[in-house]
Image (cartoon, rainbow, N blue to C red):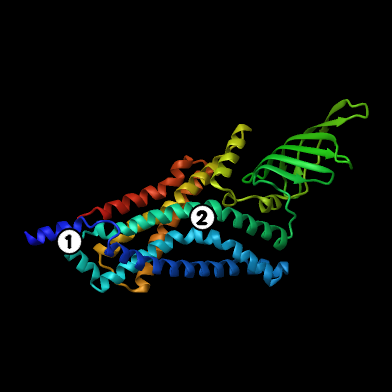
């Protein structure tokens, strides 16, 4: 009877108890150190991945350093889930090795109650990750891409958006492209605005589409409107009109990635694209991904607890890192596969973005709620 009362007392252990604070402190120490280490590792990988381009462009060491610094917020966003998984495995593994987990279980605490503070903390990390991705990542990602395109690749910053609604400065005006089909190297809805020296509009040229031949853009026909001296507008058809001098590679280099948009900016971009009758499938997937990515941290805690508590893994750094790599790699492969299916239109955007989280959530819940 005494033991039963004692067990009941510990099972009703209020949140914020000494045990909770002890677990949170231990987790946070490892989490901060691992996040710093993994971020530094990603910076080194990014440097060696770009070293050929940096050397060929002849940029200064200060420019290369600025580029790497601008990439750090995006790197943190990508590895925070892995850092959460590793920290949970290593923290609980150390407690298991020192028999502290055994002591907690013997005192009446269930595995679910032991993991409660870590689950609550992962929820906080989830919220902070979303705010980080909205407030910090787009700003620094845009700076990094602008620096890479203009100072490293020596391309003039001309495009305002990505492969949709592109604006480019031409020789005597501006060129607007409704959409750029990357798969087929085709431009759709080309409008050329011809300006005079005083920046007044001289005329317009409308071209339905243009196909890249490997050497230049080929357009079969177009329509030209010219303002006559008497103010009237003259319309004429033209064959083989000149479009743009930029190649498909140049357009892709000038494209703006989804990481450079906030959630609400991307949502606005999708609405504008749909109002013009454009295909926004790829951006719709990216929009859902922005919501799904922050939930990686709670999922990783859900996966880590059964490994650490019920399987009693040791506190070895190599073992914890190895298990984290296997789980993280599995999630990355599944996510990349689902996202690619979503971008191609094979899966609806919400399904493509949330399917990896759903699968891992079901796996985590199954093992988390299994009999101890």
| Quarter of the image with the N terminus in it | bottom left
Rendered image quadrant of residue 121: bottom left
* Distance between the alpha carbons at the discs numbered 1 and 2: 38 Å
Using residue 260 as the reference point, say whether residue 11 is left or right of it.
Answer: left
Q: Secondary structure at mark 1?
A: loop
Q: Position of residue 241 (x, y in %)?
A: 81, 38
Q: Position of residue 166 (x, y in %)?
A: 69, 43
Identify which residue, 241 or 91, lies in the foreground: 91
Using residue 211 as the reference point, say whether residue 88 is left or right of it.
Answer: left
Q: Residue at x 40, y 55 (%)?
A: 124
Direction left: furthest residue = 1
Q: 362 above or below 190?
A: below
Q: Residue at x 28, y 64 (%)?
A: 18
Q: Give the number of marks.
A: 2
Q: Which residue is mark 2?
A: 132
User: In this orientation, does residue 372 appear?
Assistant: no
Rendered image quadrant of residue 320: bottom left
Q: Mark 2: few, some, or many residues within 10 Å (few <14, many ≥20)?
A: some
Q: Residue at x 13, y 61 (%)?
A: 6
Q: Position of residue 153 (x, y in %)?
A: 71, 61
Q: Residue at x 61, y 62 (%)?
A: 70
Q: Which residue is mark 1?
A: 108
| Quarter of the image with the C terminus in it | bottom left
Q: 265 above or below 367?
A: above
- Ranked by sequence position, the earlier of labels 1 and 2 is 1
Q: Mark 1: few, some, or many residues within 10 Å (few <14, many ≥20)?
A: many
């Amino acid at each position: 009877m005494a033991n039963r009362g004692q067990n009941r007392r510990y099972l009703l252990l209020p949140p914020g108890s000494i045990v909770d604070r002890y677990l949170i402190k231990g987790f946070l120490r490892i989490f901060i150190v691992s996040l710093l280490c993994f971020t530094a590792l990603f910076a080194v990988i990014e440097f060696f991945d770009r070293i050929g381009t940096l050397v060929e462009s002849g940029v200064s060491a200060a420019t290369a350093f600025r580029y790497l610094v601008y990439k750090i917020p995006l790197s943190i966003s990508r590895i925070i889930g892995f850092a959460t998984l590793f920290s949970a495995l290593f923290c609980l593994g150390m407690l298991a090795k020192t028999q502290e987990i055994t002591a907690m279980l013997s005192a009446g605490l269930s595995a679910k109650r032991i993991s409660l503070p870590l689950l609550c903390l992962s929820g906080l990390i989830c919220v902070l990750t979303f705010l980080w991705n909205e407030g910090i990542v787009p700003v620094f990602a845009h700076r990094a891409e602008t620096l890479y395109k203009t100072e490293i690749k020596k391309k003039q910053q001309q495009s305002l958006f990505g492969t949709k609604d592109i604006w480019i400065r031409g020789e005597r005006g501006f060129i607007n492209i409704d959409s750029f089909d990357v798969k087929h190297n085709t431009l759709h809805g080309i409008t050329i605005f011809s300006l005079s020296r005083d920046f007044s509009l001289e005329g317009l040229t409308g071209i339905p589409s243009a196909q890249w031949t490997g050497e230049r853009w080929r357009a079969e026909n177009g329509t030209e409107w010219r303002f006559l001296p008497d103010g009237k507008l003259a319309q004429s058809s033209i064959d083989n009109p000149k479009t743009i001098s930029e190649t498909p590679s140049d357009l892709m280099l000038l494209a703006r990635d989804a990481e450079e948009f906030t959630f609400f900016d991307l949502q606005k971009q999708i609405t504008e694209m749909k109002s013009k009758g454009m295909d926004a499938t790829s951006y719709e997937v990216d929009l859902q991904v922005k919501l799904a990515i922050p939930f990686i941290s709670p999922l990783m805690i859900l996966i880590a607890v059964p490994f650490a508590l019920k399987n009693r893994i040791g506190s070895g750094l190599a073992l914890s890192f190895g298990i984290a790599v296997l789980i993280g790699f599995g999630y990355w492969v599944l996510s990349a596969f689902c996202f690619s299916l979503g971008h191609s239109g094979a899966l609806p955007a919400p399904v493509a973005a949330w399917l990896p989280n759903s699968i891992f959530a079901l796996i985590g819940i199954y093992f988390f709620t299994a009999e101890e």
